[in-house]
Amino acid sequence: MSGSGHGPDDASPAPGTPPAPARRRGRPARAAAEAGPGARERILAAARTQFAERGYDKTSVRGIAKAAGVDAALVHHYFGTKEQVFAAAIELTFAPALTMPDALAGGGADVGERMARFMFGVWENPVSRPALLAIMRSALTNDTAAAVLRGLIERRMLQRVAGELDVPDPEFRAQLAAGHLIGIAMLRYVIKMDPVASADTEEIIAMVAPTLQRYLTQP
Amino acid sequence: MSGSGHGPDDASPAPGTPPAPARRRGRPARAAAEAGPGARERILAAARTQFAERGYDKTSVRGIAKAAGVDAALVHHYFGTKEQVFAAAIELTFAPALTMPDALAGGGADVGERMARFMFGVWENPVSRPALLAIMRSALTNDTAAAVLRGLIERRMLQRVAGELDVPDPEFRAQLAAGHLIGIAMLRYVIKMDPVASADTEEIIAMVAPTLQRYLTQP
């Protein structure tokens, strides 16, 4: 599938794995040398924009390459398939959300509140919100995009959150809590239904935190 | 915007209002007479299919008319604008979901469980699930579609549910409960994340029902 080489030189990360270090000097790819410094970052930025604006289906490796001013082969060299470029792009977009497990570390009597507060911190941010909406849109319209998102959330977020929990079925519990917050995000930011859409976030947090606390801590 | 007439003869329902009775004999529309009996039903069925398969953006009144074998003017005559055709189509799709307030009537100590059970009854149905997913997809990719869906859920479902509740801010409470269920539906049916995706619905209901009960009944 990938246009890049295989074996030890293969620079394509699997979906959901962290992006490789930003620059790889001295790699034996002529195209990389020709594209000049910062080509990998330009590709990633272009991918992020294209996926966000056009959705998964309508974005192509060729289009990303064009926007980044490089050859399509270089996109394959750095990232692999379109699916893998998407994984790297949403990993970048999701970077703020992926720190959630740190916010929940140690548990405690306010872990539910911390989880709710963390979610709003990410969604109320005017930079990350459209990017998150774009990812949800891609996941809802394309099965591959949904699978990539699933892999990312599972491996980078829910498994880590579950590892912190001292309850039966910790992954199930973590997903119920996350599902609650996703649903509120849908109502508030996508369907924009009042009163949830215009309520003060503190008001929502006060109602939702006890629920999350129960899922995350009660046996 | 609408190609249909205005005034007392206007057959276009406002978004979110119930569709008009299936047939209107003797209406003074030559096109309706020419299209033969059942034209309104054919248009609605075609609209439903087109919106579900192509999404809101890519569906046109002309395309719906073609699929139904009628003139576009007749679509306007019966339903009004594209937005209004969409409203009528999703109202039809949502018909099973719109009976939720009846399932919750009277409240009681198991109203949370009844709400969760109702939601799964609709989503686990192999006929209604793809249709619900298609509506969510349209709402996530088009603001007009989101507004129509919002109007329908507000007027036909949440206001009625809220009317049954004896708590402060009943609409806010009803939305928190609905949001929780929407988020679980996203995880289970869209992102398909395990263990929630493959869990027995009874297992999810057992965990979620107390949360819904708290939102719907606790002061």
Image (cartoon, coloured by chain):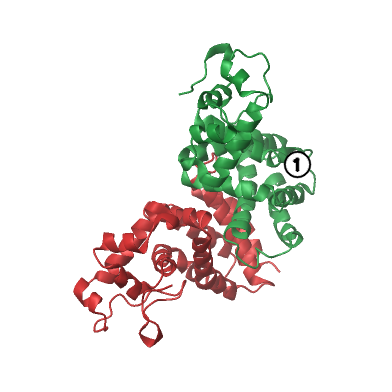
Chain colours: A green, B red
Q: Nearer the viewer, residue B9 or A168?
A: B9
Does the image show residue A19?
no
Outermost bottom residue = B8
Q: Quadrant of the C terminus of chain B?
A: bottom right
Rendered image quadrant of residue B158 = bottom right
Q: Quadrant of the N terminus of chain B?
A: bottom left
Q: Is residue A197 above or below residue B105?
A: above
Residue at image position (56%, 30%) is A15
Rendered image quadrant of residue A135 = top right
Query: Residue flagged by tag 1: what amino acid is it?
Result: Leu
Mark 1 = which residue?
A: A104
Q: Is residue B76 above or below residue B25?
A: above
Q: Is residue B136 above or below residue B156?
A: above
Residue at image position (28%, 68%) is B41
Residue at image position (65%, 24%) is A20
Please state the horizontal and vertical placement of residue B161, each as a whole percent of the image.
Answer: 55, 71
Q: Nearer the viewer, residue B164 or B140?
A: B140
The chain under label 1 reads A
Left or right, residue A106 beside residue A45: right
Count of numbered marks: 1
Please state the horizontal and vertical placement of residue A143, each as a whole percent of the image.
Answer: 46, 40
Residue at image position (65%, 34%) is A156
Crowd around label 1: few <14 · some 14–19 · many ≥20 (10 Å): many
Tell me the element at label 1: helix
Please state the horizontal and vertical placement of residue B16, each as a whole percent of the image.
Answer: 47, 71
Left or right, residue B58 beside residue B158: left
Q: Nearer the viewer, residue A77 or B120?
A: A77
